[in-house]
Amino acid sequence: MKFRVVMLALLLPLLVLSKGVFAAQDVPAIAAASSIKFALDDIAKQFTQETGRKVRISYGSSGNFVAQIRNGAPFELFLSADERYTQQLSQAKETPDDGVIYAVGQLAIAAPKSSPLPLDGDLAGVKQLLQSQQLKRFAIANPDHAPYGERAKEVLQKVGLWQDIQPNLVFGENVSQAAQFAVSGATQGGLVALSLAVAKPFKARANYVLIPQEYYTPLDQRMVLTLKAGETAKLFYSYLQSDTAQSVFADYGFARATN
C-alpha cells in the first residue's frame, strides 16, 4: 500500500505535465480565405490573449483549400469566402456538419492614390479610361477558384465591361494578391475585398469606393470544422461567433452574419 502511494505521488506530476504538453501541442492548422487576413489576425491575437491557446493560420483562395482538404491536408477549420466551397466539403462527408456563416463580404474598387483611374461604384471611370485606351492593367482575383474573383467578373459583366476589359486584366491567385496588384502601382486599380481596402497597409497607399451589392451575388462567408478538429479548433470556431470577434469583422467592412 505504501509502495502504491509513493508511486502515485511520483506519477501525478508527470501526468499533469503530460497534459500541459498535450495542450501546448494542440495548435490547429486553420485554412482561411485571404479576404479575412487582417480581421482574422486581430481575432486570433485576442483569442490567444483570452484563452492562452494558439492557432496556425494559412491564407489563400477558397477553391484551392477545398482541393487540399479533400487530398488530406491537416486543416482542422476552414473559413471560406463563399459558402459554396464549404458545401462541397460537407457533401463529400469531410465535415461533421454544414458549419455557419461568420461574415458577409463586400467588394470595392481600389486604385493607387497616384492612379489616373476615377473611382465610382458603377465603374464609369473604368469604362472612360478603357475607351480612351489609357487603361493598361486592371486587377481581379482569379475567378476560377477565388470567390471575390467570381464576384468581380459578375460586376464587370453587369456593367457591360467584361468582354472589352479582358486583355487588360491581371489575375491574382487570390484576392489578397489582387489587392496588392491594385494598390502597388503594378496595375491602375482593381476590384478587391472591402476588408482589404480598409486595412491600414492598403488604405495608406490607395483610395477605394464600395461596389453596390446589387451588382453581384452576396458573399456569404461560411466556416466549417473538419473531421480532424481538436479541442482548440472547436474553441476557436465558437470564439469566431462571439460578439468580440463579430465586432472585429464589422470594423473591417464585413456585414453581420445571419444564420
Image (tube, grey):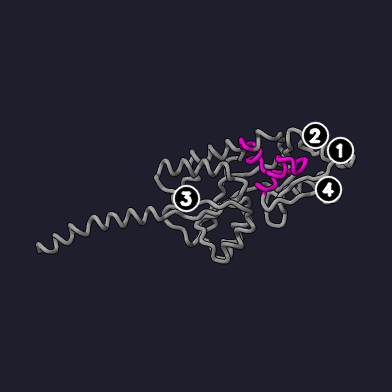
Residue drawn 19% across and 58% down?
10
Residue drawn 80% across and 34% down?
118
Residues under labels 3 and 4: Cα distance?
41 Å
Please tell me how crowded label 3 is: few (under 14), some (14-19), or many (20+) other residues with Cα within 10 Å: some
Q: Amino acid at mark 4?
A: Ile
* Region in magenta: 175-201
184 or 244, nearer to the observer: 184
The answer to whether mark 2 and mark 3 are in CB contact below 8 A is no
Q: Farthest residue in the right direction?
A: 132
Residue 194 x %, y %: 66, 40
Q: Say if 21 sits above or below 195 in the image.
A: below
Disc 1 target residue: 128
Please tell me how crowded label 2 is: few (under 14), some (14-19), or many (20+) other residues with Cα within 10 Å: some
Disc 2 target residue: 118
Helix, strand or loop at label 2? It is loop
Residues under labels 4 and 1: Cα distance?
12 Å
Residues under labels 2 and 1: Cα distance?
9 Å
Residue 124 x %, y %: 83, 37
Disc 4 target residue: 165
